[in-house]
Image (spheres, rainbow, N blue to C red):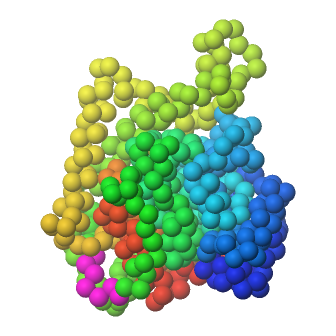
Amino acid sequence: MHTKTIQELSVLLHAKKISASELARLYLARIGNSDLNAFLHVDETLTLAQAAQADARLASGASTPLTGIPVAHKDIFVTRGWRSTAGSKMLANYTSPFDASVVEQLGAAGMVTLGKLNCDEFAMGSSNENSAFGAVKNPWDKTAIPGGSSGGSAAAIAARLAPAATATDTGGSIRQPASLCGVTGIKPTYGKVSRYGMIAFASSLDQGGPMAQTAHDCALLLNAMTAHDPRDSTSLEPGKGGDQEDYTRKLNEPLTGLRIGVPREFFGDGLAPDVEAAVRAALKEYEKLGATLVDISLTKTALSIPVYYVIAPAEASSNLSRFDGVRYGHRAAQYNDLADMYRKSRAEGFGEEVQRRILVGTYVLCHGYYDAYYLQAQKIRRLIAQEFQQALADENRLCDVIMGPVSPTVAWDLGDKQGDPVANYLADIFTLSTSLAGLPGMSIPCGFGQGEKNAKRPVGLQIIGNYFDEAKLLNVAHQYQLATDWHSKAPL
Ligand code: GLN
């Protein structure tokens, strides 16, 4: 049962072959037996109460395709009932008085919350090793990282501890862990998914999205997750990209004539040969499906690293100033005066990487450095976005979608890059530019590494589209998943 997709489970639930309560119990048992550290909080009573409601709804006939389907939320989305920690000691005992919009929307569709998923502290990281509650293990190889920051989400889907998970992507945190754990994930266009109740990291980049086994499942989840939200000032408005749409509507379109842009810069030095081989094989498969490959150049790709690591810390330093030990979050037990209380509370509550980013962010925003770093980074960010438009915009349309690797290597060993922040930052090279441009991007499983160690470590294919092209991306992914079976492989 646990290997089934949302689509399959929905059929069984509606045919009364299984109840939402039975399904919830089955997954809770799997979570209880797992040693991956993917879940931070479970509460059987809350889950089963939601499942009972879903069963009542299924019986009444007022259900949606997601009613009764279990979902687990990245611990960056606040939830009433379950603790919401953002992977930080700062919020170790925090329980939110309200639900994030995404949690509310999926709840309204009748989904049943299984619990909260581990992640890098405040979503800062690429390996999940920055969580204050310990790293998550990659289900394919427990000596490897699952990727980050949504490592718990990706590991939970891969190990079939949940059929659906929420995640967030600021610079790659949906796509990279999905790639390293062999699951499907989509980061929608910036502003599509409400950030209300999503604990803020870098507000001009943060975007929520789903992870599941298949593109079809992700489309079903997106249908319930995207709605204009007046409580988020950057939520897209109807008529301006924020319209309600059915993300499954293109799922049967053939790919004949699809032009796939293959950026030279995504295949240069630093790309591991085994990852390149899997990605090139996927591109060949697309050619068989009727697509043509177009050589394109995204010359600013390498600049996305310094640009992102100026802008994201700048925004983080501002967002995280709210954690002062006064209103909520950790407060030091002993202090002399107010300034001392701030200092000690923040020094104790924040981990090393978060402190590093607050320092970098504060520095680049300083009077005297602002023009040289922050403003300069914003200018290059604009150039990065323009370069994508030269490839994807209607008037140019060199290509319909862009494809390449998600991560330059398969998952690395736990501990391998710990204590080396720059090595972690460099691994983000293929995901950051999409985030800086605000474009939608996906990762789908397309194979495994090579050699004794890497043969069990998954490789993901990245698919990038123009603004609001989610339905097209999902179909491009879906057609591949109809023709191949990488997405149905599980480490069980
Ligand atoms: N790895 C990137 C970082 O550390 C991206 C994280 C994210 O997307 N949340 O900031």
Q: Which image quadrant is residue 454 in? A: bottom right
Q: Is residue 190 visible?
A: no
Along the line of sight, the residue nearer the viewer: 30 or 475: 475
In this orientation, which residue lies closer to the viewer: 39 or 467? 467
Residue at image point 36% right, 27% down: 365
Residue nearer the viewer, 209 or 302 = 209
Instruction: Judge from the rendering whether residue 283 lies leftward or rightward of residue 153; answer left or right.
Output: left
Q: Is residue 290 left or right of residue 242?
A: left
Seen at 35% across and 53% down, the residue is 438
Q: Is residue 403 magenta?
A: no
Give x and y (percent) for residue 93. 74, 37
What residue is rendered at 67% in x and 65% in y?
A: 111
Picture quadrant of residue 46: bottom right
For the image, the number of numbered tags is 0
Tell me: residue 17, above or below residue 128.
below
Residue at the farthest right position: 45
- Which residue lies most toward the top here? 337
Q: Is residue 33 visible?
A: yes
- Magenta segment: does it hold 256? yes
Give the x, y percent position of residue 319. Answer: 50, 33
Determine the image quadrant of residue 367: top left
Question: Residue at (45%, 72%) from the top-left corner?
Answer: 247
Q: Taken as a whole, is the magenta stretch helix, strand or loop?
A: loop
Look at the picture and state if 339 lies above or below 131.
above
Find the magenta span and give its range: 254-260
Residue sitting nearer the eye, 70 or 387 = 70
Where residue 16 appears, as percent x and y from the top left, is 76, 83
Percent position of residue 23, x then y: 77, 73
* Vertical placement of residue 492 versus 352, above or below: below
For the C terminus, the image quarter is bottom right
In the shown orientation, is residue 2 left or right of residue 208?
Answer: right
